Amino acid sequence: MTDRQKQRRTHHHAHRRTRFRTGVAVSASALLALVAGAATAPAVAAGAPADTATSAITATTAVTEATGGRGGHVVTVRTAAELARYAGAAEPYIIRVAGPIEGAPPGTETVVASDKTVIGVGTAGEIAHGALRLRPGTRNVVLQNLTLGGGIRLDATVRQVRIDHNRLPRTDERPLRTAPADAQLTLTDNDFSIGATPGTRTGTGPGATHGTTPRPAENTGPQASLGTNTVLDVPRDYPTVQSAVDAVPAGNDGRITLAIAPGTYREQVRVVATKPLLEFRGTGGDRTRTVIVYDTPNEYGGSNGSATVLIAANDVTARDLTFVNDFDEEAHADLANKQALAMKTTGDRIVFENTGFLGNQDTLMTDSPQLTRISRVFIRDSYIEGDVDFIYGRATTVIERSLIRALSRGSDTNNGYVTAASTWKDNPYGILITGSRIVSDAPAGTFHLGRPWHPGGEPDAIGQVLIRETELPAAVKSAPWTDMSGFPWREARFAEYRTYGPGAAVTPDRPQMSDADAARHRVADYLAGQDGWAPHTARPTH
C-alpha cells in the first residue's frame, strides 16, 4: 500500500459521514449500527451509493409521520434556559432557535418532551453544547435544521420522531445515541459528520486517528431557507383563524404564514400591534374560496368593534382570500350607526394581494395609530365593493390594478361615495387609485368619487385623493366631489389624472393633476416613506 493510499484510508476511518438523502424510517438499533459502525450493520455492495446503504437498514414497520408542535404556540429561543423551558413543557410548541445557544456546560442534556418542533432559523440555529434528550415514552417530535454540538439521545420507546436537515458534528463517533429498543425515526438530509479538525483525536473506536473535517455535503445539514417562515395551517392544526393568530408570540420577529384552507370562517380576527410579520394566505388560489366574514355594525364598539378583521401590527400581508361584513342594514333600521367594516388597518407596511373586501358603508378603512403618524397600505389585483365612504381613512393607501364596485342604494340622485380620506395635512400622500376600474350598477350621474372626512371635526385632516389612469363608469357625477359635515371639498386635495370611460370628463368641478405633479405622485412616491418600502416591485405570487 502506498503512502497516499494509507493517508486516504486514515482519513476515511477518522471522519465517517452518513448522509440521508431521502426520508426513510429506520429502527434505532439499525441506525446505531450504521452511525457507530457496529459489526451488526448489514453488508452493502462495494461502490453502492449512500442511499443504497440507507435503504439496506430501513425498518419494515410503518411509521406515523411526526407532526411535532403543530397546533401549539410559536416561540423563539436564544438561550439555554428558554430552550429548556419550552422543549420540556407539557403542551405543544413550535420552537424556533434563532441563533447559537451557548451557556449549557458540555454533557448537559436538554429534555425534549412530546409534541414539539425544534427548528433552526436559517443556518444560525445551533445548540453548541449538550445533547437533546428524548426520554422513554416521548412521541411526536420534529428536530429540524439545527447544528447539534452535543448530538441527540433517544431513549427506549420513543415514537414518531423526524430528524431532518441537521448537522451533528460530534467527535466521539456517536452523534445519535439511542437505546437498543426499536425506536422508529424518519431521517432526511442529515449530516452526521463524525470527526474533528486536523490534529485532534476523533475517538477511541477502531480506526480512530488524526483526521480532517471535509466540507458539508451538498443539500445536507441546515439550510438557509428553512425555519424562516413558520406555517400555521387553519383549520387542520388551528380550528379558527384567530386561534392561529393567538399562537403567534408577542414581539414576534420571524415570518409566520397562516395557511387558510378553502371555506367560510365566521369570526372576527384581531391582530394586535405586538404581532408583526404575519401573512394570511388562502390556499385555494381563487380569493372567493377562502372567506372570513362577520356581521357587526359600528353601533357596537365603533370601527374597532365592527371590523371583521382588524390589523394593528406592522408588516402584515394577506393573499388569496376575501374579507366580508354581511351586516343587514335593512333588517336593523332601528340602529343609528349601521356602518359595517370588513377590514380595518392601523399598522404600517400592509399588503393585500388578490384579496376581496365586501360590504356596504365603510367596507375598507385604512388608518394609522394617530393623526400625525403615517401608515402605508398597498392593495393590488383585488376587489372592493360598497356604497357609502367604502374606501376611507388617513393611511397612505395605494390601490393598483383592482376592480372597485360602487353599489347602488336604489336612489335616482345620490347612491354614495367611493372615498372619504382624512389624510394628515402634512402628509402629501393619501389615497391613490391607479390603473384600476370603477364599475357600478347605479343610475348615471348618481355616485361621487369622494368627500373630505374630518373625524371629530379635526381641522388638520385634509384629505388627499388621486384617481389616476382609471376607468370610470357612467354612474359618476359630473361634479364628483362633495362637501362633508360642513367641510368644503375644495379645501381638500382631490384630483384626477388621465381618467377615462363614460364617467370621465374635464370640467371646472373636476380638478385635473398636471403632468409635473403627476410625476411626483406615482405608486413609488406614495409608498416609499423614510425606509424605501417598495412592495409594488415584488412579483405577484398568484
Image: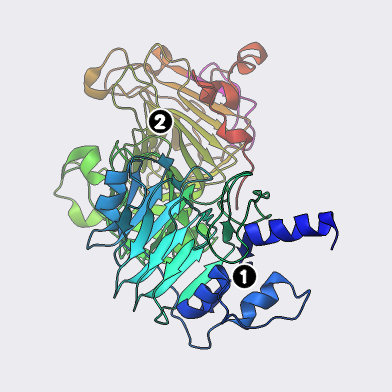
Of the pair 143 and 37, the residue shown nearer to us: 37
The answer to whether residue 133 is seen in the rendering is yes
Q: Position of residue 342 (x, y in %)?
A: 34, 47
Which element carries disc 2, helix, strand or loop?
loop
**Residue 530 screen position, x and y as percent:** 49, 17
Residue under label 2: 348
Instruction: Determine whether, in the image, residue 132 is placed left or right of residue 219.
Output: left
User: Which range is magenta?
Assistant: 494-509
Specify few, some or many for label 2: CA neighbours under 10 Å numbering under 14, 14-19, or 20 or more: many
Report the disc number at residue 22: 1
Q: Residue furthest right?
A: 2
- Using residue 488 as the reference point, say whether residue 539 is left or right of it: right
Residue appearing at x 74%, y 72% in the figure: 49
- 107 left or right, relative to 6: left
Q: Position of residue 180 (x, y in %)?
A: 41, 79
State if disc 2 and disc 1 touch (CB < 8 Å).
Answer: no
The secondary structure that dominates the magenta segment is loop
- Which secondary structure lies at badge 1? loop
Q: Nearer the viewer, residue 237 or 527?
A: 237
Labels 1 and 2: the sequence-earlier one: 1
Under mark 1, the amino acid is: Thr
Check the image and report above or below for 357 versus 185: above
Q: Amino acid at mark 2?
A: Asp
Figure quadrant of the N terminus = bottom right
Q: CA distance from mark 1 to mark 2?
A: 42 Å
- Is 428 located above or below residue 166 in the figure? above
Is 504 a magenta residue? yes
